[in-house]
Image (spheres, rainbow, N blue to C red):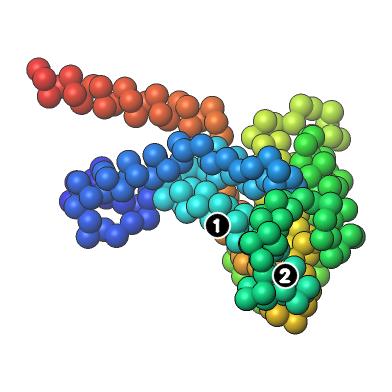
Amino acid sequence: MKLSTFLALGAVGVNPKRTEAELQRFERSNKQCIRKDWEYPERGGRLTRIVDNLTKVCKFYIDKPAYQCRCLKKQKNMFWTFIKARRVCRDRQNNQSKKNRTRRDAEENEENILDEDDGVVDQVARDLIDTELSQVEGPVNVDMLEELYFENCDGMDANSADRATTEECEDLTDLIKNMKEASTQRGALDEEIKERAEIIYRINRMHNAMSNWVRSYVSKGSWCKDKRSNYIKRIEANTRRMQDRRRRYPTNPQKLKRKRKEEREEREAAAAAENN
C-alpha cells in the first residue's frame, strides 16, 4: 500500500481493505456531503437556531470528513426526530389515536407543529433555551468558562469519568488558566485560544439548549417519558463525541480554505506531470 494511501486511510478512519478507487469515491462522497447546504425551516425557531449553530461546527471547525458528514446527517436526523416526537407525544397526551384523527386534525397538526408558542410543557426549560442561544452570540469570557467547568467538572471522579469527559475538563482548565494569564498581563488573547474557548462553549451550550428543547416540547406522559429520557442521553453522548472530534481535529474556515487550495494545486501539478 502506498504511504499516501495509508495516511489517507488513517485520516478518514475507513476500512484499510478498501481499494484506492473505493477510498477516492468515499472521500469524494464525504466532501460532497460537507459542501451541501444543510438548511432547516425558519419556522423551526429555536430548534433551527440550535441545529444551525451545531451544523457550523461540524462543517467549519472539525477537520475529519468522515465524521463531519455523519455529524451533519445526525443534526438533520435529530431535528426531524424531535419535531415528530413533539407531535406524536402531544397527540398521545391528548388521547388522540391515529385511528380517530380526521384529515383536518392531521392538517392542523402539520401547520401547528413548528409553532413554538403552542404546546409548551416546561416553561422554565423553554426560557433557558433563550438564555443559551444568547450566550453563544458574543465573545466567551473567563466567567462563562468557569460556569461551564462548575456545571460539568466540579466534583468529577477522575477514576469513573470517561476519557472524553476527562479531556474536556482538562481543556477547560487549560483555557481558563490561559485567559486569566492574558487578563492579568493585559496582553492580547491569542486568537487560537479565543477560538478554542468559543467552540468548546458553543458545542456544550447548544447541546444543552437542544436537551431543553426536548424538555420544553416533548410531553411527559407515560408513553413519551422514556423517549424524552433517551433523547437527552443521545444528546449528551453527541456532545462528548463532538467535543472529542473537535479537540483531535481542530480547524477553522481559513485553514480549510488554505487546505482546499493546496489540494487543488497538488491535483493540477499531478495532472500536468502526467501530460508531460
Relative depth, front residue between 154 and 108:
108
Q: Looking at the picture, how far across and down is residue 87, in whole percent? A: 69, 63
Left of 33 or right of it: where is 240?
Answer: right
Q: Is residue 134 above or below residue 126?
A: above
Residue 268, position in %: x, y? 25, 22
Q: Amino acid at mark 2?
A: Asp
At x 33%, y 56%, the residue is 14
Give above or below for 221 relative to 109.
below
Q: Which residue is mark 1?
A: 77
The residue closer to the viewer here, 139 or 85, is 85
Circle 2: is it few (<14), some (14-19), or many (20+) Cα within 10 Å?
some
Q: Answer whether residue 125 is visible to the viewer in this image.
A: no
| Res 98 quadrant in image | bottom right
Residue 119 shows in the view:
yes
- As drawn, the residue found furthest toward the left would be 276
Q: Nearer the viewer, mark 2 or mark 1?
A: 2
Mark 2, residue position: 91
Q: Secondary structure at mark 1?
A: helix
